[in-house]
Amino acid sequence: MHRREFLQALAGFGLAQSLVPVLRAEPAAPSLRQLAAERGILFGSCLALKYCVQAPAYQQLFLEQCGIATPEVHMKWDSLSSQPGVYDFSQADSFVSFCAAHRLLVRGHTLIWHQALPAWVTQQMTPANGQQMMTAHIGKVAGHFAGKLYSWDVVNEVLDPGSQRPDGLRDGPWLRNCGADYLEPAFRAASAADGKALLIWNETYLEVSNGFGQAKRAALLSLLDRLLAKGVPVHGIGLESHLRAEQAAILGDAAYEAFLAQLAQRGMKVYITELDVQDSSLPSDPVARDQAVAAIYQKFLTSTLRQPAVHGVVTWGLADRFTWLAGYRPRKDGMPVRPLPFDADCQPKAAYYAIARCLESAPARG
Ligand code: XIL
């Protein structure tokens, strides 16, 4: 869609008009946003602007339930730049304006990731220019939004025990072209460009207590200690938390809580950043499935929220109508996946009530 058509589409659904602040319609039951706020916790979800165009009811639900929003795609490198050095911030700017108009905080996502790279970056980047390309991108994007974002996912998914390196880093384009110390210049460049946003290291599988997850935890703590000893501005850790139903037994256990405590000891703020529950291994019956999914939300969040260093819970979508898992982890029986707190018609499911209960019983943050 071209920019003009996109803006027309937004205008057609009242999005453009909503760039002036409007009063939120309050739902009858307390929203997850309110329940979280009462405990000093942020609750939110990811959003792509097209969902608001496709389903105004979803926009309404989002605004009722969320206090913070992550752009699902709009700030990724390949969404911002299709040609060398040329940036088009129009959609990302619309996202930030939409959030400002509705008093939603914004999690910037994401500056450095091995995915969503435009072809020209992969083609042009070499060990000679890699670090310069990385810091120029961070400076450009973080500088563009300076002062407007709650936080930035400065680096995303940089660990991979499968790469078999002693430091645990992923053998990917950043490591190969910027060297094994690239996290330091990445965080320093983000801090120089936006001194206000919290600077986050966002990572997968840290929440899973198996060998893979334990290896990631150890690698993260050791790299983090080195960064903090050098005064590198890392303010928080994001745990993506794309949970899998078949791993219920190794989620939210004592080893996980011990890891959260280790992050807290290092002064880290902790965020659950992309929470959903993959139901592809669960039975077909939607009622039984919803109960099993809710039980995993309940177990994981009860354990997570006990740790006062956890300041936010962000799901990766709010209602089953818009979930990346429909394409990424479809069910073998062909039935629609049900990984989120609300169903495809934006009605609350068992998972919503589980999340609400966990927020209600979480200790209040100072
Ligand atoms: C996903 C989006 O949900 C999809 O729409 C997109 O096609 C691919 O990326 N980890 C992340 C997110 O950090 O950015 C990913 O989002 C999901 C996994």
Image (cartoon, rainbow, N blue to C red):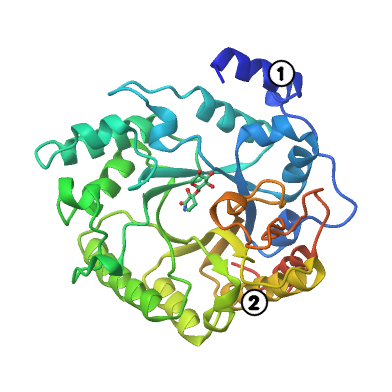
Within-10-Å neighbours for mark 2: few <14, some 14–19, many 20+: some
Q: Earlier in the sequence, mark 1 or mark 2?
A: 1
* Rendering coords of residue 224 (x, y %): 29, 65
Q: Quadrant of residue 99?
A: top right
* Rendering coords of residue 68 (x, y %): 61, 47
Q: What's the mark number on residue 302?
A: 2
Q: Is residue 139 above or below residue 296?
A: above
Q: Nearer the viewer, residue 320 or 72?
A: 320
Cα separation between marks 1 and 2: 41 Å
Q: Nearer the viewer, residue 274 or 336?
A: 336
Q: Nearer the viewer, residue 3 or 222?
A: 3
At 31% from the left edge and 62% from the top edge, which residue is drawn? 159
Within-10-Å neighbours for mark 1: few <14, some 14–19, many 20+: some
Considering every residue shown, the one lying at the far right of the view is 28
Q: Which amino acid type is marked by label 2?
A: Thr
Disc 1 on helix, strand or loop? helix
Considering every residue shown, the one lying at the far front of the view is 333
Q: Quadrant of residue 123?
A: top left
Q: Is mark 1 within 8 Å of ligand 1?
A: no
Judge left or right: residue 182 versus residue 98: left
Determine which residue is flagged by label 1.
11
Q: Quadrant of the N terminus?
A: top right
Disc 2 on helix, strand or loop? helix
* Rendering coords of residue 275 (x, y %): 58, 60
At 75% from the left edge and 41% from the top edge, which residue is drawn? 58
Q: Which amino acid type is marked by label 1?
A: Ala
